[in-house]
């Protein structure tokens, strides 16, 4: 494996579990120095331990991406500890309980939009603030195939928030490519993490549901999402600006 990110500092929000952890480990395996951020310290510490077990360098920072001061402090801590910020992956996301549009509670609506949209915007705001003053960088936002690409009954709040992430990513890409910052998104479908499981669903039932609903016949692996993120963040994708890469096993084909 080539060490595409040797000497680079990478920040991954939502890096304590699931897709975020897989992304962090994949970057570490290719030589990056990692900062993983989230609201809970324990899973972040577990990710750091996994990175260090493989001989990598990592730092855990607890932060709430919906709070501007937290994100500003997160970027400052990253720069203080590793000397810069080259790549950011904005992976924090919240899935609210399903409900038809007229039945969505105001709290769930606000939670989806605040975490999934404001959180990504604030993260980019402070990441870009550093990057454009220090020669540029790359940002990858984790959106979803639900939203700009697909709508499902009962998921209006989540789909609206992720459609906004897709649109925000493309607008930010146009705004800041002149600053030397490439911004793109990945939009996964169902991935083999707890977030894609239904309440009380067994592993066997979930696998059967995926066989019936996903053309590829299965859920995606977290490592497959991580591989796409690493490509978009790498120099190999130097002409890729404002892309929204679908990774959903053919659901939206």
Image: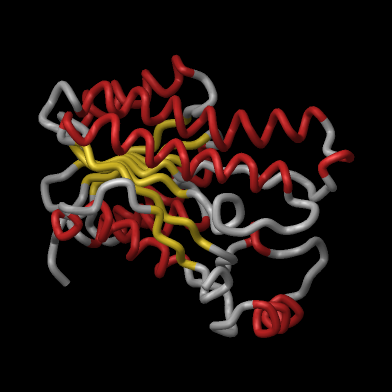
Going 67% across and 47% down the picture, which residue do you hit? 95
Residue 107's spot in the image, x, y percent? 78, 29
Asked whether residue 14 appears in the rendered view, the answer is no
Instruction: Report the side of 15 relative to 156 (left or right).
Output: left
Instruction: Give the colour scheme shown.
Output: secondary structure
Q: Nearer the viewer, residue 199 or 234?
A: 234
Asked where in the image residue 230 lies, by quadrant, the reply is bottom left
Q: In which quadrant is the N terminus drawn?
A: bottom left
Q: Nearer the viewer, residue 199 or 53?
A: 199
The correct choice, above or below, for 90 with respect to 190 in the image is: above
Residue 67's spot in the image, x, y percent? 52, 20
Asked where in the image residue 30 lies, by quadrant, the reply is bottom left
Residue 88's spot in the image, x, y percent? 31, 40
The correct choice, above or below, for 239 with respect to 84 in the image is: below
The correct choice, above or below, for 122 with respect to 51 in the image is: above
Q: Nearer the viewer, residue 238 or 196?
A: 238
Going 46% across and 66% down the picture, which residue do you hit? 247
Instruction: Report the side of 244 relative to 139 (left or right).
Output: right
């Amino acid at each position: 494996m080539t060490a595409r990110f040797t000497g680079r500092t990478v920040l991954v929000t939502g890096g304590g579990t699931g897709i975020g952890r897989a992304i962090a480990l994949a970057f570490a395996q290719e030589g990056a120095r990692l900062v993983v951020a989230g609201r809970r310290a324990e899973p972040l510490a577990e990710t750091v331990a996994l990175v260090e077990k493989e001989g990598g360098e990592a730092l855990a920072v607890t932060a709430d991406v919906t709070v501007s001061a937290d994100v500003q402090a997160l970027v400052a801590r990253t720069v203080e500890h590793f000397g810069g910020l080259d790549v950011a992956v904005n992976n924090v996301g919240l899935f609210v309980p399903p409900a038809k549009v007229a039945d969505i509670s105001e709290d769930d609506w606000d939670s989806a939009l605040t975490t999934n949209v404001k959180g990504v915007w604030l993260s980019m705001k402070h990441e870009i603030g550093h990057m454009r003053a220090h020669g540029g960088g790359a940002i990858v936002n984790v959106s979803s195939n639900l939203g700009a690409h697909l709508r499902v009954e009962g998921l209006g709040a989540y789909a609206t928030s992720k459609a906004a992430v897709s649109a925000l990513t493309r607008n930010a890409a146009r705004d800041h490519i002149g600053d030397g910052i490439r911004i793109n998104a990945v939009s996964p479908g169902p991935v083999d993490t707890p977030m894609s499981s239904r309440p009380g669903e067994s592993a066997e039932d979930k696998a059967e549901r995926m066989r019936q609903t996903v053309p590829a016949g299965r859920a995606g692996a977290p490592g497959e999402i991580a591989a796409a993120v690493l490509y978009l963040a790498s120099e190999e994708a130097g002409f890729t600006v404002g892309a929204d890469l679908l990774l959903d096993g053919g659901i939206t084909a």
